[in-house]
Amino acid sequence: MDRSPTSTLLIALLALCSAATGCEELPPGAADARIWITLDGAGADGANLPDDPRDAALDGMPSDLAPLPDLAPLPDLAPPPPICARGDTDGDGWGTDPGCPTPDCDESNRAIHPGAVEACNGLDEDCDETIDEGLATAVCGRGACRRESANCIAGRPQRCEPGAPADEQCNDIDDDCDGAIDEAAPTAACGQGACRRVAACIDGVEQACVAADPGEEVCNRADDDCDGRTDEGFLAAVSVTAYSTLVGHHPVCDGVGERIGPNCNAAINRFCGAQGCAVTGFGPVENSGDTSVVTCLAAVETHVVPFAELAARHDVCDGTRERIGPNCNAAINRWCQARGLVGGFGPRESGADAVHVACVGAGAEMRGTTYAALSGHHGPCDGAWQRIGPDCNAAIHRWCRAQGFESGFGPVENSGNDAAVVCVGR
């Protein structure tokens, strides 16, 4: 019968003794008698025993046995050296013992062993029979310039190079690689002047172009009515002023020291530039006493032209032999025509080696006439008494007005009885 040493108490009673009766000898054979009393009140066979007066003798015993004291731990024993350290001749802690599950694959280089960090050098540092693995890729650039590049190729570190930017297109791609998509992408345009519009680019798709409706032309240096002309009806405006006013723009043009010439050209240019939408002007187209009548122009091109370029159009206008006069009139007019315009005049202002000129286009026409016809509008401009000057300015102005224009300048070319003039403001 099994009994737990912690739950069963074996009491061998060989004799019963008491202070009153003394000890009684056990009957023969009783010496082998054993009474098993379990701490939980069960008999030797597990049945509950009847109460026994002698159980009182056990009442003073503690119910719990004191725990055994903890045993001191055994001293640590140094673990045996790892088997992989056997045969480690390069001192990296990894050897070549056949029993090692991952032996060192190169005992001549301590940077090579199982678990080492892989580098880009064409070697198998971590002994896994793969070279330069796990070195990932680099990403550089943005938009269409974005590139991915392996960090290591054939044992050589690589540098990620972004692609070259291109002109932006309407394609939902950042072609110029600036972080914005389809900005300022070229799209179809329609209309002209103030009506001009550019098709929108939405989500990489070019939308239909719709021109704006034309408006009423006003003097603002814009093509408001969208007919390809700017400030027509305002191109030329005849203005009656005075030398006492012009002298405030240039001190020499006072009607005494000069009534017509380069200084008055500069004064008229500055006077007209301050008038409404005008850019510059020419004249005087009429003059008498303190009165000076000038023609102010809008929508013209102004340029600074070296005398060397003008001399290429007419050699006399070289800044030395002539700076203002009939030859320079022809040179300036030809220079403007070479730019695809109707003609031009000047100098509006003069410099040492160059002059300021004005070229006219829309709203202007170059027309041929004769001194005989011009003298009919102002007698002195007959090609003999005067071929260019204040009287011819008046004759040309009046002749152009008779042709339905606002005014005119010239002659821009002249030969014998023939003269070419430019009329403006139709």
Image (cartoon, rainbow, N blue to C red):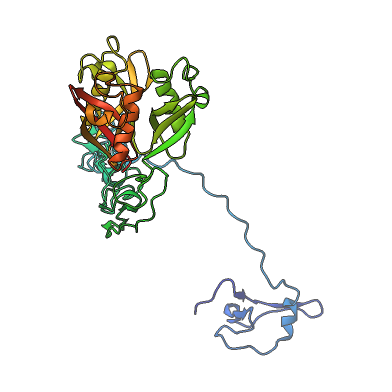
Name the spot of residue 299 as percent of width and height, x first.
Answer: 35, 39
Viewer-side residue, 72 vs 227: 227
Quarter holding the C terminus? Answer: top left
Name the spot of residue 321 as percent of width and height, x first.
Answer: 27, 10
Left or right of 19 in this view: 339: left
Q: Residue drawn at (17%, 21%), measured in percent from left and top? A: 416
Viewer-side residue, 176 vs 37: 176
Left or right of 67 in this view: 310: left
Q: In this picture, is 216 found above or below 404?
A: below
Name the spot of residue 145 as percent of width and height, x first.
Answer: 27, 42
Name the spot of residue 64 as percent of width and height, x first.
Answer: 68, 70
Residue 256, can we see it?
A: yes
Q: In this picture, is 368 found above or below 210?
A: above
Viewer-side residue, 265 vs 229: 265
Residue 124, can we see it?
A: no
Q: Residue furthest right?
A: 20
Q: Quadrant of residue 302?
A: top left
Q: Quadrant of residue 387?
A: top left
Q: Residue drawn at (55%, 74%), measured in percent from left and top? A: 4
Q: Quadrant of residue 15?
A: bottom right
